[in-house]
Image (spheres, rainbow, N blue to C red):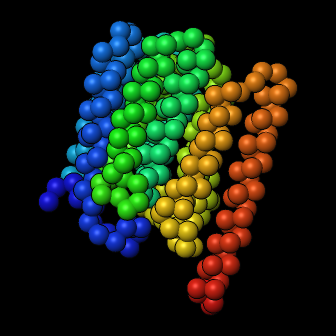
Amino acid sequence: MLAIDAPNARSLHKRPIPRTGGLGIIAGTVAGLAILDEGWIFPLLILSCAIAAVSFLDDVKDIHAGYRLSIHLVAAYVLVGVFLRLQTGIIVAAVLALAWMTNLFNFMDGSDGLAGGMAALGFGFYGLASLLAGDITFSLANLAISAAASAFLIYNFHPARIFMGDAGSTFLGFLSGAIGLIGWQKGLWSLWSPMLIFSPFIIDSTLTLLKRLTRREKIWRAHCEHYYQRLIKMGYGHKNTALIEYCFMISSGAAGCFLPNGAAKWAVILFVACSYLAFILIIDISWKKFITKKCPGQ
């Protein structure tokens, strides 16, 4: 059967599960945004759906990672260079950041309820921040995405009955980065806000990537070295891991949504950074003990 996620050596699930839930997220998002009258909505939906279409093909039949990445980069450039018309000096950085957000959502979609919960909470905080800034239409757009992700989460929370697949994860990843940039361009928040709101995914994926690069591994290949994957393997399970991640999502999302100005802003950012550092060190130490106990010879 097409688009079925069969368990393998790297999987955290034990039985074949459909990975077509992303199509429902996309349909709900398109339906919610299509009724809003905003000039940025149509190009954003076209680009995000194009990314999702390529990813769905990858769900059905593997597509080379280089081809997928090139589509992500082109879509990111079209958005920031053609539609948003950002300053030339920051276009490259914005394109790379947007492409990374597109992919890291996919990287983190490996545990029941994790990516769906991040989307529901993350876009929910985007909606709240937009409302606080006085942009009701932008708020409604984000709340529509949050609602679509929440409906999916009902069926994806442990034990998951369906996965969002690459189509859903890259669609949401692109939207998370794109709307963060659009909100910044509209003056609704600083660039730190979207980074804080989606920091649980950004930090886990970025640190894992850097570790794999230092070991000269082929980073485009699937693996099971993310921190959330380690928590599951150490016995916390899908449900408890999701709940732990939700705590970080809520706290970092609130920090990004209500980020103060001046010196207080840097105090909040430093506190969040230290919290993540402590959590990462605890997992690293616990993981080493777990591996040593499981494989004494290593």
Q: Position of residue 120 (x, y in %)?
A: 46, 38
Residue 130: quarter of image: top right
Q: Is residue 271 left or right of residue 61?
A: right
Q: Residue at x 34, y 71 (%)?
A: 14
State whether residue 55 is above or below residue 50. Answer: below
State whether residue 12 is above or below residue 209. Answer: below
Q: Position of residue 87 (x, y in %)?
A: 57, 14
Q: Is residue 128 left or right of residue 67?
A: right
Q: Is residue 99 left or right of residue 87?
A: left
Front residue of this view, candidates 21 and 182 = 21
- Residue closest to the far left: 1
- Residue closest to the far bottom: 297
Residue 231 visible? The answer is yes
Q: Residue at x 55, y 73 (%)?
A: 235
Residue 64 visible? The answer is no
- Residue closest to the far right: 263
Tag count in the figure?
0
Q: Position of residue 86 (x, y in %)?
A: 53, 15
If the image is split into quadrants, where does the C terminus sit?
bottom right
Q: Is residue 262 left or right of residue 242?
A: right
Q: Position of residue 74 (x, y in %)?
A: 38, 29
Front residue of this view, candidates 39 and 135 = 135
Front residue of this view, candidates 100 and 194 = 194
Q: Residue at x 38, y 73 (%)?
A: 9
Residue 70: quarter of image: top left
Q: Residue at x 36, y 52 (%)?
A: 156
If the image is split into quadrants, where does the N terminus sit?
bottom left
State whether residue 230 is above or below residue 202. Answer: below
